[in-house]
Amino acid sequence: MLKLDIPEFLSHNTIYMKIKNILFITIILISSLTLGGCFHNQQQQLTPDESTQTTQSGKSSGSQNETIQPAVNILQNYVEYTPTIVVESAGQGKKVVLFFHAPWCPYCKAAEADILNRIDEIPENIIIVKTDYDTYSDLKKKYGITYQHTFVQVDAQGNQIIIWNGGDLDEIIKNVQ
């Protein structure tokens, strides 16, 4: 007759359960990382570059990942900050709004998505200037910016007209003076 030692049986069962739990956790972690990578790769910024130049018909030309860009307004009404953009835009009769944006800020991402999705709703006389929060410390100091997702309307000389925190395209249009 086979004699089974209970403590030995329990110790083998415990090891078996630990290995099973470790394998389960490992599978979950690998799955999470894989799915996270897939979702991350699907997010793309809608900024013009050589690989996604648009033609007059609005279709992409020559890109392996065929993407359709918004109308040309993105180049006129929502632009990246440059040191000369305020003077140039004001010289064209536009009201300039600096959007202190951080790529890691979820509120900034939501505001930018709203701006890009509704780019054709930006009035012709308004230009929104995406200003990198982490790069332009001198501008943050000049306007007293303490956190990202802040908007500042400025005049042709770069003087602050109005400042506000948060919002989407409707809030920008409502606040511009």
Image: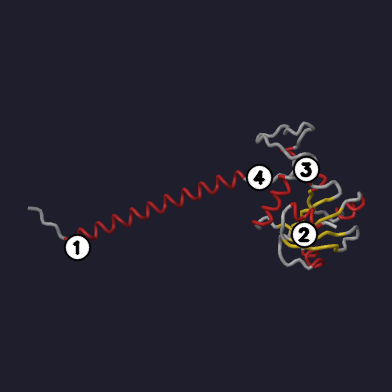
- Residue drawn where x is 66% and y is 58% of the image: 105
Locate the C terminus by quadrant: bottom right
Q: CA distance from mark 1 to mark 4?
A: 58 Å
Residue 151 disc label: 2
Left or right, residue 48 beside residue 91 = left
Q: At which x and y percent is residue 79? A: 79, 49
Q: CA distance from mark 3 to mark 4?
A: 20 Å
Q: Is residue 130 above or below residue 57?
A: below
Q: Amino acid at mark 1?
A: Pro
Q: Amino acid at mark 3?
A: Asp
Residue 44 disc label: 4
Q: Amino acid at mark 2?
A: Phe
Q: Nearer the viewer, mark 3 or mark 1?
A: 3
Q: Which residue is mark 1?
A: 7
Q: At which x and y percent is residue 37? A: 55, 47
Q: Is residue 28 above or below residue 158?
A: above
Nearer-the-camera pick, 99 or 31: 99
Q: Nearer the viewer, mark 4 or mark 2?
A: 2
| Classed neighbour count for the residue bearing mark 3: other residues with Cα under 10 Å, few (<14), some (14–19), many (≥20) | some
Q: Which residue is mark 3?
A: 120
Task: Identify the element where label 3 is drawn.
Answer: helix
Q: CA distance from mark 3 to mark 2?
A: 20 Å
Left or right, residue 175 beside residue 25 = right
Q: Earlier in the sequence, mark 1 or mark 4?
A: 1
Q: Earlier in the sequence, mark 1 or mark 2?
A: 1
| Classed neighbour count for the residue bearing mark 2: other residues with Cα under 10 Å, few (<14), some (14–19), many (≥20) | many
Q: CA distance from mark 4 to mark 2?
A: 23 Å
Q: Earlier in the sequence, mark 4 or mark 2?
A: 4
Give the quadrant of residue 148. Answer: bottom right
